[in-house]
Image (spheres, grey):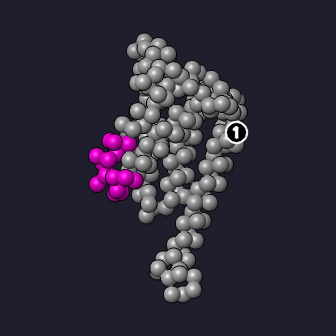
Amino acid sequence: MPTIFTHAALPLAAGFGLGVRTVSPRLRMAGVVAAIVPDLDVLAFGFGIPYAAALGHRGMTHSIAFAMLIALCGVLAVPWLKTSRVMACGFLFFAAVSHALLDSLTNGGLGCALLWPFSSERFFAPWQVIPVSPIGTDFFSSRAIVVLASELKWVWIPCIAVAVLLAGVRRYRDGNPSRSHGVDQAGR
């Protein structure tokens, strides 16, 4: 799995790129939580649940169905999130499903049960470019530096580039008088 910091990268980048008028600060933070919460399934190890079980690591909490459940919970929290139902649902789904998609890019584990409950098959992306993050005290080892460097290259730099691009498009659109006042290019 990527580090907890990297799971937060996608909703943070999307929130920044789309801006606060589209993604409220509360929705952005809910997106960070939605992107991290699938890894709560590691608690299953403490209950003796095997890794490969549906309730095991990278099982049901790493599925599209679980991401949809998170998104629907966001719809219930729309007043607190200060957003629309559609934005809450879409943004939180994106954030939650991004977790499994990032995990599928790692080079370890059993893959992610993306299609649970319809299939217990575990999936990896066609290429696994991110080394699995060390857990616990090993997180501060020299191996963690290699993982963080890989995440920087494959996740953070592309996320920052997309966020800056989206922010630039948004600023151009918001600053272009012909777009913001309903005036066409000829000034009519």
The residue that label 1 is drawn on is 149
Magenta-highlighted residues: 71-87
Residue located at (58% from left, 60% from top): 166
Residue type pointed to by label 1: Ala
Tell me which secondary structure the magenta stretch mostly adopts: helix
Residue 177 shows in this picture: no
Q: Tell me residue 85's x, y (percent).
A: 33, 52
Q: Quadrant of the N terminus?
A: top right
Q: Quadrant of residue 149?
A: top right
Q: Tell me residue 30's x, y (percent).
A: 41, 46
Residue 146 lies left or right of residue 40; in this view the side is: right
Taking the magenta stretch, the answer to whether it contains residue 76 is yes
Residue located at (49% from left, 54% from top): 15
Taking the magenta stretch, the answer to whether it contains residue 26 is no
Q: Quadrant of residue 92?
A: top left
Residue 90 lies left or right of residue 150; in this view the side is: left
